Each structure stands twice: as C-alpha cells, then as structure tokens.
Amino acid sequence: MRRKVKQGIYKQMQKFADLTRTMITTGKLDRAKKCFSIVESLYITGNAQTKSAISNVYIYSVSGVLEINHLNIEKLFPNTLKKEYIKQINAS
C-alpha cells in the first residue's frame, strides 16, 4: 500500500508540474506564481515523501522550462523552492 501512495504523490507532482509548465509557456506568470506558492506550502508542511516528490519531479521539471524560456528563477520561485533548486544545481 505504501508503494502505491508513494507513486501517487510522484504522479500528482508531475501533473501539477505539467500544469505549471503550461502556465509558463502561455505567458500566464501570475498563475504560475500561484502554483509555486501552493507547492512551497506543500513543501513546508509535507512529509518526506512529499518533499522528495517536489524536489525530484516538480522543481526539476519546472526549472527546465523556466531556463528554456529565459525567465528569472530568482524572481519567480519562492524562497524555499529557490533553496531546493540551488541544492539541485550544486549537486549536479
């Protein structure tokens, strides 16, 4: 059962990342910022699995689109997501 829940959160994060990426590519940055805000609150209040899904799926997926579209991650990401993004960059 735990495995199913774990896969579920990763799939949900991928769907939310897809939604956020759509908002970014269509120029709806205000809506994308709302998505970032929601994900930040999930990251702060979530358990280890939620944090892992956000780091490994959401931030990775969304940051690539931001970079491709030459958008400033520093201005768009909330502080918590920005710190996690920097960890990913330094790890690679």
Image (cartoon, helix red, strand yellow):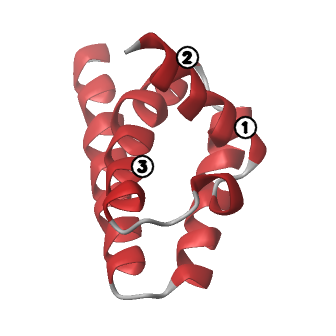
Residue situated in front as seen by the camera: 82 or 6: 82
Disc 3 element: helix
**Distance in Å between CA atoms under marks 2 and 1:** 15 Å
Tell me the quarter of the picture where residue 4 sits: top left
Tell me which amino acid carries mark 2. Answer: Ala
**Distance in Å between CA atoms under marks 1 and 3:** 14 Å
Extreme front residue here? 70
Q: Which residue is mark 1?
A: 80
Crowd band around label 3 with a 10 angstrom C-alpha radius: few (<14), some (14–19), many (20+): some
Q: Earlier in the sequence, mark 2 or mark 1?
A: 2
Query: Which mark identifies residue 48?
Result: 2
Coordinates of residue 80 in the picture (x, y in percent): 72, 37
Tell me which amino acid carries mark 1. Answer: Thr
Residue drawn at x 47%, y 23% as measured from the top left:
88
| Residue 1 located left or right of residue 27 | left
Q: Which residue is mark 3?
A: 63
Residue drawn at x 28%, y 49% as measured from the top left:
14
Coordinates of residue 75 in the picture (x, y in percent): 70, 61
Query: Eyeballing the image, is 49 above or below 24?
Result: above
Tell me which amino acid carries mark 3. Answer: Ser
Coordinates of residue 42 in the picture (x, y in percent): 63, 43
Tell whether label 1 touches label 2 (CB within 8 Å). Answer: no
Tell me the quarter of the picture where residue 72 sits: bottom right
Q: Nearer the viewer, mark 1 or mark 3?
A: 3
Coordinates of residue 84 in the picture (x, y in percent): 60, 29
Q: Nearer the viewer, mark 3 or mark 2?
A: 3
